[in-house]
Image (cartoon, rainbow, N blue to C red):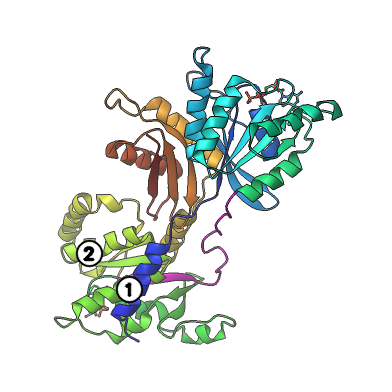
Amino acid sequence: SDFSTAEFADFEAEVASEELLMKPVLAVVGRPNVGKSTLVNRILGRREAVVQDTPGVTRDRVSYDANWNGREFVVVDTGGWVSDAKGLAHQIAEQAELAIGAADAVLFVVDSQVGITDEDEAVVRVLRRSKKPVVLAANKVDDQRTEAEATSMWNLGLGQPWAISAIHGRGTGDLLDAVLEALPEAPQERYSEVGGPRRVAIVGKPNVGKSSLLNKLSGQQRAVVSDMSGTTVDPVDELCEVGGQMYRLIDTAGIRKRVKEASGHEYYASLRTQGAIERAEVCVVVIDASEPLTEQDLRILSNVEDTGKALVIAFNKWDLTDEERRKYLDREIERDLVAFRWAPTVNISALTGRNVDKLSKAVEEALAGWETRISTGKLNAFLGRVAAAHPHPLRGGKQPRILFGTQAQNCPPTFVLFTSGQLDQGYERFVERRLREDFGFTGSPVHVEVRARE
Ligand code: GDP
Ligand code: GDP
């Protein structure tokens, strides 16, 4: 039952193929006053109030979580996009282009009462080039009389015009059905349907006290395990109750077997550790607090972060530390563990049992941070505040802007920012830091991905 190289290769392939899945994005475009914002409100059913303009902050990107017939997607409302009178058509086309580039499908709104204008034509050209699926909404068909106007929109060459009245809701149901057909399937929420005890991996370099901790945790509980009906456990895993909560401890067989890492076997030990991290939802990294921190400790911590798992740090052998050692440990933490400041820590002794029950609270906290979902509306309000207070520095006369963002997935929280240009590394990290300050994410890595349109 040892972890083989082939199995590890499978893991790697699985991780690599796991593309960033996210809710599909629908951009609502069209020239000013055709009724885009009214339609967006209708789509949202006003469940999420449209953000009011903040003085001094241009409302140039607003996106929201939407749901129609149980399908989830993100709506980007370009309704508030600024426009000046000069070169209006050009400007609208340019803005539409940005929104369209970030979208999976486009809802193009025209005004049936006014008919097709030059500005509409400009957007149509952008839409043709983009090759994105387009749903055409002929708005302001409030009654039978304007139906004929809507029909003339076939001339745009974008397929069937859907005659609607955003204000009265006329025809919007059929329109949304057409929108769903144009959008790719939304991904499933990760892990939510798995259920059962949470998967915990106890990892750490040799001799830090992993098997001692495991024995402490699961000592008297083997009986409880067999009583759990309907729960299948890998022969290498073990169910165990900590602090009143049932957990599935990953690869306990590997820890118990205590295959001591003779030279040459270290490679397999690290494969095994990697395998356990991959299978876990949360990792408890055990560190020997009585000894100086080592590279190997840091490598395992980074490994957990890179694999995107929730993290708890357990400083073990606390019974062996004196005041001097603890002072020194504080300095080591300050110097070497700043990058993991987000992880909850517990000072334990697997030997005496000190604080071992507190691990459960830390694990729960980390899992909560790992599963956090921020609504698209909240996220964009946040991004607006950040950009207003700290705009991206000018670069070669240009200023990349964050158009909008969305949380692509949780477990761990992963954000995608759609921007009008590549962001500086420093600015990206700044946004990441502010995300943590505003939303927490205790115990979880946070990933930010930027999709730039130059
Ligand atoms: P946007 O600039 O494209 O976002 O347009 P708005 O949603 O702000 O709407 C512009 C104007 O058109 C507003 O006065 C709306 O009340 C009006 N409007 C929007 N939808 C309809 C509709 O279906 N019928 C009519 N008669 N007016 C509408
Ligand atoms: P593993 O290789 O990480 O599984 O570490 P072990 O559980 O085998 O522990 C290595 C050694 O450290 C053993 O001699 C344990 O008795 C000892 N040890 C583990 N935890 C503690 C602790 O909290 N305090 C003290 N004093 N010794 C510990």
**Whole-percent x and y of residue 167?**
75, 29
Q: Is residue 33 above or below residue 371?
A: above
**Comes first in the chain, label 2 or label 1:** 1
Mark 2 secondary-structure assignment: helix
Q: CA distance from mark 2 to mark 1?
A: 24 Å
Quarter that holds the N terminus: bottom left
Mark 1 secondary-structure assignment: helix
Using a 10 Å C-alpha cutoff, classify the residue at mark 2 as few (fewer than 14 neighbours), some (14 to 19) or many (20 or more).
some
**Whole-percent x and y of residue 66?**
63, 44
- Amino acid type, label 2: Asp
Furthest toward the top, the residue is 85
Q: Main SS type for the magenta part? A: loop
Quarter that holds the C terminus: top left
Circle 2 is placed at which residue position?
297
Quarter of the rendered image showing ligand 1: top right
Q: Is residue 318 visible?
A: yes
Q: Is residue 16 magenta-colored?
A: no
Q: Quadrant of residue 41?
A: top right
Which stretch is magenta?
183-203
Is the residue at mark 2 in contact range of ligand 2, meaning its CB lies under 8 Å from it?
no
User: Which residue occupies the foreground of this view, 440 or 38?
Assistant: 38
**Whole-percent x and y of residue 19?**
43, 58
Q: Residue at x 85, y 29 (%)?
A: 144
Circle 1 is placed at which residue position?
9
Q: Is residue 82 visible?
A: no
Horizontally, is 436 left or right of 331 in the view?
A: right
